[in-house]
Amino acid sequence: MARILPLLAKVVAVLAVYLVVQAMIMTGVVDDYILITMVTICVNIILAVSLNLITGFTGQFSLGHAGFMSIGAYTTGLLTMHYPTWWAFLLGLLAGGAIAAIIGFLVGLPTLRLRGDYLAIATLGMAEIIRVLFLNFPFTNGAAGLSGMPRFVNWTWLYVFTAGTVILISNFLRSMPGRNLIAVREDEIAASSIGVNAVRAKTLAFVVGAFFGGLAGGLYSSYFYFIKPDLFGFQKSIDILIIVVLGGLGSLTGSVIAAILLAVISSLLQPFPELRMVIYGLILVVVMVFRPQGLMGDRELTFSAMRRLLPHRWREARP
Amino acid sequence: MTEILTMSQVSLNFGGLTAVSSVDLSLSEGELVGLIGPNGAGKTSIFNLLTGVYAPSAGAIHFHREGSTLNLGGKKPHAICHAGIGRTFQNIRLFRNLTVLDNVVIAAAQNQPYGLVASFLHTPKQHRCERETRERAMELLRIMDLADKADELAQNMSYGEQRRLEIARAMATQPVLLLLDEPAAGMNPAETASLTELIAWLRETFKLTILLIEHDMSLVMNICERLYVLDHGVLIASGTPAEIQHDPAVITAYLGEEVADA
């Protein structure tokens, strides 16, 4: 019973968010413009949460996440262009994630002996290689990119994959292989001394992070009809890293909150194009000065934490 | 008594510097042996050789367990831990930003039999393993008198508590041989005395073999059955504490040569 209740509360909360938004879309409260922002938010949540696994929880500084994203985007894009069916779309998402994971593994093995800024440069190089490959492959249409893919992504798919990613990665981090990543971040030598295979842990972080990065890319390409290599450059990797750092390295809920916050700020500033990036930048500077550990630090916003915020009388009444 | 660990003619060189030179050392099952020597003698280097942090430049290290012999030279630290050797560190290496309980849980969870898929899906089997691991970790915290601090961050603990937590974490991997690197460093005499009792109790209860490095002679002389003395990377003496106390080579190493005529 003690375990069923919180689980039930989580399921209800996850379903409620979905149904409320779905109702708002059906009644027209959420129009197409707002929906675009929501798609951006969801894709960014998946990207940020998966990068957080690599950089925040495992402590591996990566500047190449857009590279993994582009692999998923092109895989799903190409598959659905040639086979515009639902199963091709789903297969594209999974295949995109899987190919990104394989690349993550191949890149991870030789580069994971590097640390900190050296690893960052190596992953940056990897993402650039991937970008240049997509520029030059005969089937990716060069700099002009792919356009006209059928749109399969709707709110339901988006929500399933976003919530699914957050839940799966959160589960992973609360189990033995996931906690091993955190141990490696905290102290690699100590982690080895208690039986953690540090090389395996770091590679696993890259593989899992890359998989979900690829998945996000697939969702992106299926919603926005159009992808080109330049969308997945250095700038995109930095954008994802900003979300992770702003939300807090080592906090999944921090990444979710930051992804929502930045997208909302960005779209609120849409009417002021000349000031937009200035204000956006200013917000980042202010947060980093006053909360260098990010909005959430390495804490999570959990149900039990929220209950502690309730007044005492309510808390006592709860089981 | 059967031997559990043998080092034969083990050397460790860093470029031109010899940190450990042709060391022969052996431990029998259930023994409590001390490794002492002046600062920089190479004691921690020997621990690092035994746990795979360094590979020996020459010589062989053999670990005997349940009738089989394992060559530890060149093995990775995590593999040596799985073979049954646990250790603590001279400069405490805890997972500082994690709770006391999580520090032990991570170590206790290493042998859990569930796979990657179960860890993403949190299957019933994973839940069961997780609960067992937590209970085992709490039990160790109770033994080390840390149970009431389970939810505190490791970095907020006192120095003595951090040392005990490190032992708890090493014990969670269920070692048969435990290497303790200056377990009493930074403790006051009362804490050292209770640590001495605790080490003796752990060894008795868990049928451990223990090798410890220590500068605190009250601890060393109290519980060690045998001592090895290291100076400049060379073993200069070995024997019972009483023998070591009167060994001229040891006195020279610690206090310097006696000058015949001033």
Image (spheres, grey):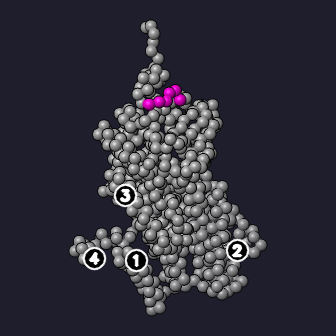
- Name the chain under label 2: A
Task: Identify the residue at image location x=33%, y=40%.
Answer: B192
Q: Secondary structure at mark 4?
A: loop
Between A188 and A211, the residue placed more toward the observer is: A188
Q: Position of residue B166 (x, y in %)?
A: 42, 49
Question: How many marks are shown on the rendered structure?
Answer: 4
| Figure quadrant of the C terminus of chain A | bottom left
Q: Secondary structure at mark 2?
A: helix
- Name the chain under label 3: B
Closer to the eye: label 2 or 4: 4
Q: CA distance from mark 1 to mark 2?
A: 47 Å
Q: CA distance from mark 4 to mark 3?
A: 29 Å
Q: CA distance from mark 3 to mark 1?
A: 27 Å
Q: CA distance from mark 1 to mark 4?
A: 15 Å
Mark 2 Cα shell of 10 Å, populated few (<14), some (14-19), many (≥20): few
Dots 1 and 4 on the same chain = yes
Task: Identify the residue at image location x=60%, y=47%.
Answer: B69
Q: Quick check: can you spot residue B9?
A: yes
Q: Position of residue A184 (x, y in %)?
A: 51, 55
Which numbered tag is attached to residue B139? 3
Q: Secondary structure at mark 3?
A: helix
Query: Would you name the residue on which mark 1 appears?
Result: A7
Instruction: Report the predominant secondary structure element of the magenta stretch.
Output: strand
Query: Would you name the residue on which mark 2 appears?
Result: A144
Query: Would you name the residue on which mark 4 appears?
Result: A318
Which numbered tag is attached to residue B118? none
In this view, which residue lies farthest toward the right? A138
The numbered mark, 1 or 2, whose residue comes first in the sequence reads: 1
- Marks 1 and 4 in Cβ contact (< 8 Å): no
Closer to the eye: label 4 or 3: 3
